[in-house]
Image (spheres, rainbow, N blue to C red):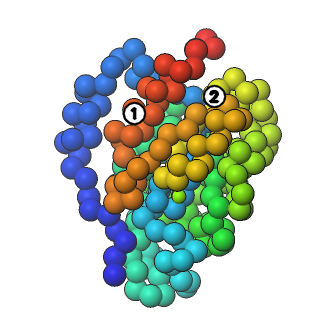
Amino acid sequence: MTLTPPSSSSSSSSSTRDKKDKSTANRYPKAVVFDLDYTLWPCWCDTHIQTPLKSVSKTEIVDNYGTYLSLYPHVESIVQELAANNVRIVGASRTATPQVAKKLLTMLHIGNKPAISYFDSLQWGQGSKTKHIKLAANQLGMANDLQSGEFILFDDETRNRDVNKVNCHFVHVPDESKGLTREIFEKGLKQWASATPSTL
Ligand SMILES: [Mg+2]
């Protein structure tokens, strides 16, 4: 069985980038929060993945069941873009097996570095993601930024829309076969930018 999503065409991604509206193209929030399961990778890591995990390449692992797993195809360039623009990156997951999620983030690479090295904060556990996001904001000294609307959560589960209560903008990742795509990412940034007055 493979959980590796189909490769995307790089030409469609660059043409999307060319068509981007320049007025909002370069505006980023101070922090982006990512759900993990079905947002960054196509599985529930507490259900579909069994350790031990083996590295197949820098971007693919195989688990004890023979299940192959990679990040969704657009995740790498999105994470690199955020890091290059000094946006803090947070992971927020309700998974029952944070140790498996951490292992995946350590084994799967983004631009030659373990994916986990791009995350400024990782928050785990059941319950509302409002809790995860408030903890991350406090940990990063960004409570005021959260209050002023400088956080976005990308997540496949609409129940997590309740993060709006702590002023975090919610962007739904609707298709588990594609996960976080550049189209969703850019649309989410634009929606956030038009809903959030610039503090500059
Ligand atoms: Mg999820």
The amino acid pointed to by label 2 is Glu
Q: Residue at x 59, y 67 (%)?
A: 101
Q: CA distance from mark 1 to mark 2?
A: 16 Å
**At numbered mark 2, what does the secondary structure look like: helix, strand or loop?**
loop
Q: Position of residue 73 (x, y in %)?
A: 34, 55
Is residue 101 among what the camera can see? yes
In the rendered structure, find residue 150 and report the number of the disc placed on it: 2
Q: Residue at x 33, y 20 (%)?
A: 21
Depth check: 107 or 3 in front?
3
Quarter where residue 32 is shown: top right
Query: Badge 1, how many Cα within 10 Å: few under 14, some, many 20+?
Result: some
**At numbered mark 1, what does the secondary structure look like: helix, strand or loop?**
helix
Q: Position of residue 95 (x, y in %)?
A: 63, 66
Sequence-first disc among 1 and 2: 2
Q: Position of residue 139 (x, y in %)?
A: 79, 43
Q: Residue at x 58, y 33 (%)?
A: 169
The amino acid pointed to by label 1 is Glu
Q: Residue at x 38, y 76 (%)?
A: 68
The residue at label 2 has a CB less than 8 Å from ligand 1: no
Quarter where residue 24 is shown: top left
Q: Does 28 appear above or below 112? A: above
Is residue 117 among what the camera can see? no
Mark 1 lies on residue? 186
Query: Badge 2, how many Cα within 10 Å: few under 14, some, many 20+?
Result: many
Image-based side of 51 in relation to 110, left or right: right
Depth check: 195 or 138 in front?
195
Q: Does 185 appear above or below 53? A: above
Image-based side of 65 in relation to 88, left or right: left
Q: Does 77 appear above or below 126? A: above
Q: Does 54 appear above or below 149? A: below
